[in-house]
Amino acid sequence: MADDYLVRIGKLIRDARQHRGWTQSQLADALSTSQSAVNRIERGNQNISLEMIARIGEALDSEIVSLGYAGPMHLRVVGGRRLSGSIDVKTSKNACVALLCASLLNKGRTVLRRVARIEEVYRLLEVLNSIGVRTRWINDGKDLEIVPPARLEMDAMDAEAARRTRSIIMFLGPLLHRMDRFKLPYAGGCDLGTRTIEPHMIALRRFGLDISATEGIYHAEVQRTSPDRPIVLTERGDTVTENALLAAARNAGTTVIRNASSNYMVQDLCFFLEALGVRVDGVGTTTLTVHGVPEIDVDVDYSPSEDPVEAMSLLAAAVVTESELTIRRVPIEFLEIELAVLEEMGLDHDRSAEYPADNGRTRLIDLTVRPSKLEAPIDKIHPMPFPGLNIDNVPFFAAIAAVAQGQTLIHDWVYDNRAIYLTDLNRLGGRLQLLDPHRVLVEGPTRWRAAEMMCPPALRPAVVVLLAMMAAEGTSVLRNVYVINRGYEDLAERLNSVGAQIEIFRDI
């Protein structure tokens, strides 16, 4: 076999194992082999027979390791079906990845409850495992246990996995406390245009971190110091705020962070830091005061809250398919502006009384959406930092506006390319006019039609295309949906549970 084919098979085996919630040792026990052999197989460094592939497939109860299923994942969508019943919102993707990075602050055992089983999390776990962090899925694969080593093996980092996630940038904050010198690959993730890390550098320089970049690698050197005045972030970004929080958490003394994001994942990170013994004042505001502790060695158990962007995805699914659907465990604090806009457009919905999330802090509701006659909003749709309309929820308004009467202007000023990807809806019968790289004019209502197309390379526009396919009469095909799996756990299966008809398949 060619080496690249062995690597492809190894990745398929690794993904199937992680989906099952097994460690390499558990798979090795099932195969009567060693953990090191499984490790070599998954890295593509060991020849593997057809018999062994069949045994692995049987052990993992997964056809994904069979030779006929080695290609990328696609979706076949039979549209025009109404959704019904109820569906739960999963835990926040962005909170989970931030907490995985934050676990590097702790010398003790961290347990995260109901972690999102998504590709972004898997990539970070691969990076953490490669540098010596022990992780395992527990409680029937629902929760994640993380135990750090005494010393991180940074030279052994899985660079390929690191480059496939932008979240790797949040290693900078915790690592500057653990070593004087280290390297990180350039951050990847969605193709959303140029996204500078300069705001991160400005903030972290105040803690003594110096970065130089050569040949796809960030070279970090640390001469630790404490900020002598408040840190003012040059952009109110989520990951920038999180990196500053991670740096401040183990900085002895008090750090003030101004122009901080108060978005959902930042709040979850603050709650987690408090569980580690770090006091954070001002949670939910744009000024955070962090009372750091130089050493953190505790056993901590934390439940990240639900994902407001997934809640918005499910809400949009109900709207575009003209369905009545109850979406349970919606973090209402982070969807209030979106719902206010939709109310003005004519959305018919009910809300339950509020109740607390498992973290004890985030407010949840159950939301029932009914078929509605929507009118285009008078004002344009545009994102703002929390408590404004969420940046990641803007794309869903393209699909919603497409079923409303009239013209809607969507201004996605944050990302260079994302508005361009929204015009993929035209392949499905939409009438979207790109005015410039950031603005798109949507004309509704739309008579959706089935189509076969490649998945856009950005997460939220990709899901918007899938939702439109669900509304289009006939059979559509969405090819290479890895980007959707980066941010959503079992989305096709969960939509099928409320009446969608989506088939997962791979090229033979």
Image (cartoon, grey):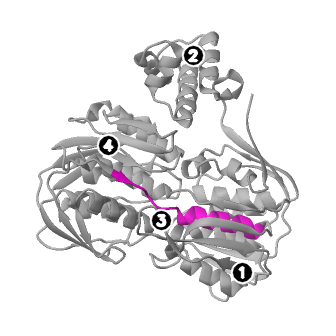
- Span of residues in magenta: 301-320
SS assignment at label 4:
strand
Amino acid carrying label 3: it is Ala
The spot of residue 227 in percent (x, y) is 14, 66
The alpha-carbon separation of the residues under discs 1 and 4 comes to 46 Å
Residue at point 55%, 52% (across, down)? 487
Instruction: Say left or right for 319 vs 50.
Output: right
Quadrant of the frame with the C terminus: top right
The spot of residue 67 in percent (x, y) is 68, 21
- Which residue lies under the disc numbered 4? 184
- How busy is the neighbourhood of tag 4: few (under 14 within 10 Å), some, or many (20 plus)? many
**For the residues carrying marks 3 and 1, which lies nearer the camera in this image?**
3
All told, the count of numbered labels is: 4
- Which residue lies under the disc numbered 3? 357
Question: Is residue 197 highlighted in magenta?
Answer: no
Residue 2 is labelled as 2
Q: Is residue 125 visible?
A: yes
Amino acid carrying label 4: it is Leu
Whichever of callouts 3 and 1 sits on the residue coming sooner in the sequence is 1
The alpha-carbon separation of the residues under discs 2 and 1 comes to 55 Å
Q: Predominant secondary structure in magenta?
A: helix
